[in-house]
Amino acid sequence: MDRYAVFGNPIGQSKSPFIHSQFALQCAQQMQYEAILAPVAGFADSWRDFVAAGGKGGNVTVPFKEQAYQLAEVLSARAQQAGAVNTLYLNHAGQLCGDNTDGIGLVADLTRLGVNLAGCTVLLLGAGGASRGAIGPLLDAGVKQLVLANRTLSKAQAIATSFDSRVQACGFTDIPEYAYPLIINATSAGLAGGRPDIGIQHLIGCQLAYDMVYGAKPTAFMQWAKQHGVAQQADGLGMLLAQAAAAFTIWRGVTPDIEPVMALLKQQLAA
Ligand code: ATR
């Protein structure tokens, strides 16, 4: 049976084995998918051991996305743009290929939620790996202007230099007073129950407040947006599923439907 795995440290919390097992059932694919705890400084050895034992492909999560980027022999354009790899596979020549499906997962989820990205002005909060991987796919989907705001201005500026004038960097206190129909929280603040400290005036005209973090309850950012009149809020569960579906499609050539798996995950989170 074909073997796949997600590599991370820690890895116990990962939903990927459940998600990919569900996709495999749904699409009648003979495969198994496991979670592998790799040593923090030993991702490459773990990956090589896995391939030597017949591993066909993998997902990579924190803290190995940059190490996977270094290890891959062939990088997709979006992996290059993100500077990180979340999906690995071997091509027909046996070369290790690295791709990044996080950003296209975000775009797929926004589309599922009814957002029209063509011509849209977007406020993207945070300048870590999650944010960097999202920018290229958002621009490719037609975003007209992307304001990249970060608590630490220099990190936003460093990312913006890799893109053209559609991407504008700023700190939280000097966010341009545009109307932002879409605000995306790509900071990790929600993991600790917090939210990025931006002014409520930026919510005027916002139709969707999207948080890449997810959990049993709406995140602090989502609750704050709702309190201040934003019509729609969403967390990152759909993005998690959509990036997994894109990886699954790369490996298996079939695209699973995320909706039934999302319903199961919501039940698990609520339990
Ligand atoms: P990831 O790979 O998930 O993006 P990261 O690279 O550690 O994680 O980046 C975390 C991001 O969340 C950064 O933009 C960080 O802001 P700083 O660059 O100023 O550190 C942001 N962040 C984390 N906690 C935050 C908080 N409480 N308020 C605002 N931004 C926060």
Image (spheres, rainbow, N blue to C red):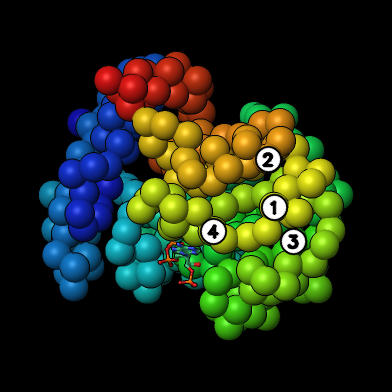
Instruction: Name the kind of residue labelled 3 in the image.
Output: Leu
Vertical relation: 22 (above or below) 225? above
Query: How far apart, in angstroms, are the residues tagged by discs 3 and 1?
Result: 19 Å
Which label sits in the foreground, 3 or 1? 1
Q: Residues within 10 Å of mark 2 (few under 14, many from 20)?
A: few
Looking at the image, residue 245 sits to the left or right of residue 15; the answer is right
* Badge count: 4
Which label sits in the foreground, 2 or 4? 2
**Label ID, residue 138:** none
Looking at the image, residue 29 sits to the left or right of residue 242; the answer is left
**Label ID, residue 200:** 1
Query: How far apart, in angstroms, are the residues tagged by discs 4 and 3?
Result: 17 Å
Residue labelled with disc 3: 146
Query: Is the CB of mark 4 within 8 Å of ligand 1?
Result: yes
Instruction: Name the kind of residue labelled 1 in the image.
Output: Ile
Q: Quadrant of residue 32?
A: top left
Residue labelled with disc 4: 196
Locate the N terminus and report the quarter of the image it occupies. Answer: top left
| Residue 176 in sight | yes
Q: Earlier in the sequence, mark 2 or mark 3?
A: 3
Q: Residues within 10 Å of mark 1 (few under 14, many from 20)?
A: few
Residue labelled with disc 2: 228
Q: Residues within 10 Å of mark 4 (few under 14, many from 20)?
A: some
Looking at the image, residue 35 sits to the left or right of residue 146; the answer is left
The residue that appears at 44% across and 53% down in the rendered structure is: 194
The residue that appears at 35% across and 18% down in the rendered structure is: 267
Q: Residues within 10 Å of mark 3 (few under 14, many from 20)?
A: many
